[in-house]
Image: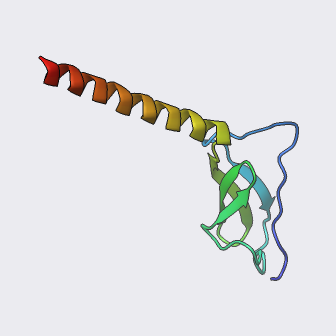
Amino acid sequence: NGSTLQISLINGFVPAPTDSFVLIQSNQLLAGFFSNVADGGLLTLPEGDFTVTYAGQNGVTLSNFAAIPEPSTYGALAGLGVLAVTLGRRRALRRASR
């Protein structure tokens, strides 16, 4: 109780959504929890989010990594949206002029 879970990914490593990491495993029951994330909660890193599972009070596992898209991804999606709207308007104008 009161300890925080802090994780850093190094050397550009980005986990796949299917990756799972056992942080703590014990044959004994563990007492307490991390104060910054509940069982089933999300641990947010700069690269994305992990689901944290306290496995039956004898382990802690990170899983279900969800990467946070880079800002350039948002720019590309916005550009595609503008392109789609522009093409749609051109088609509408061509149909109206017929």
Residue 70 appears in the rendering: no
Residue 7 appears in the rendering: yes
Residue closest to the eye, 70 or 23: 70
Q: Quadrant of the N terminus?
A: bottom right
Up/down of 30 relative to 15, above or below: below
Q: Residue at image x 82%, y 36%? A: 12
Q: Is residue 50 left or right of residue 28?
A: left
Position in image of residue 77 (x %, y %): 51, 36
The furthest residue to the right:
11
Up/down of 26 relative to 71, above or below: below
Residue closest to the eye, 63 or 58: 63
Q: Residue at image x 21%, y 19%? A: 94
Q: Residue at image x 60%, y 67%? A: 40
Up/down of 74 relative to 96, above or below: below
How are the colours assigned in the image?
rainbow
Position in image of residue 72 (x %, y %): 65, 36
Position in image of residue 65 (x %, y %): 64, 49
Q: Residue at image x 44%, y 34%? A: 82
Q: Quadrant of the C terminus?
A: top left
The furthest residue to the top:
98
Q: Is residue 87 left or right of residue 93?
A: right
Residue closest to the eye, 41 or 20: 41
Position in image of residue 35 (x %, y %): 76, 78
